[in-house]
Amino acid sequence: MFTGIITDVGAVAAVQPTPGGARIRIATAYDPDGLAIGASVACAGICLTVVQKGGNGRGWFEAEASTETLQRTTLGTWTEGTRINLERALRAGDELGGHIVSGHVDGVARILERERVGDSTRFSLEVPEALARFIAGKGSVTLDGTSLTVNDVVGNTFTVMVIPHTLAVTTWGDRQAGDTVNLEVDLFARYLDRLTGRA
């Protein structure tokens, strides 16, 4: 589990296709000694498992992604140098600064517009019709691993406001209209929909 609070911005160092998907090496400021083999790291919101690690100074870790992950997320578009938001897995007793995030991406959202509003930046995004019902004004959403609050919702589009600090310490400072981002809807909204559907 994660919280959607980004703790490092890593960079893809290599992508190697495999018979079942791909193996990705990610350069990070995380101390490799503090990363256990088998640990979970949210990479642009995708929960990946550390399968190898190393490095001196700036470390790195490697993770494997299945074909389904490549198809359902932005990971299939990553190339050497792609910057990605990173978050270590939540430990019992840690501060829950964002919201409960599973790292299981539901789909991909597309940025329609980026607009400066005072000191902050408003992003308008479009989501697949099937996921729109899970997004509610003032609710939580995870975009590229970042916990954000939904402002307005109209049909299958919605807006989020990103403060200057978040722009500076995540990949949101790079994001422009036309970009795609990984979307995880609120966990509780997903289960509530399932329960009410059965009722």
Image: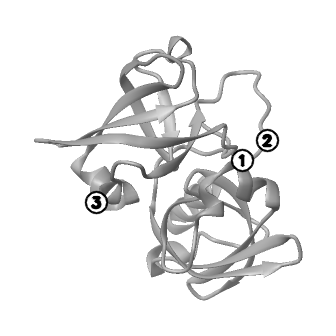
Q: Secondary structure at mark 1?
A: loop
| Residue of label 2 | 97
What's the residue at 48%, 79% (across, down)?
178
Q: CA distance from mark 2 to mark 3?
A: 30 Å
Q: Residues within 10 Å of mark 1 (few under 14, many from 20)?
A: many
Locate residue 173, reporting x and y percent: 66, 62
Residue positioned most to the front = 57
**Image quadrant of residue 25?**
top left
Residue positioned most to the left = 19
Q: Amino acid at mark 1?
A: His
Q: Secondary structure at mark 3?
A: helix
User: Which label's residue is closer to the chain start, 2 or 3?
Assistant: 3
Q: Amino acid at mark 2?
A: Gly
Q: Amino acid at mark 3?
A: Gln
| Residue of label 1 | 99
Locate residue 117, reporting x and y percent: 83, 79
- Determine contact: label 2, label 3, CB under 8 Å: no
Locate residue 166, reporting x and y percent: 74, 55
- 140 left or right, relative to 102: right
User: Which label's residue is closer to the chain start, 1 or 3?
Assistant: 3
What's the residue at 59%, 64% (across, down)?
174
Relative to 154, is 44 above or below?
above
Q: Residues within 10 Å of mark 2 (few under 14, many from 20)?
A: few
User: Is the N terminus in the top left, top right, bottom left or bottom right quadrant?
Assistant: top right
What's the residue at 56%, 18% (across, down)?
31
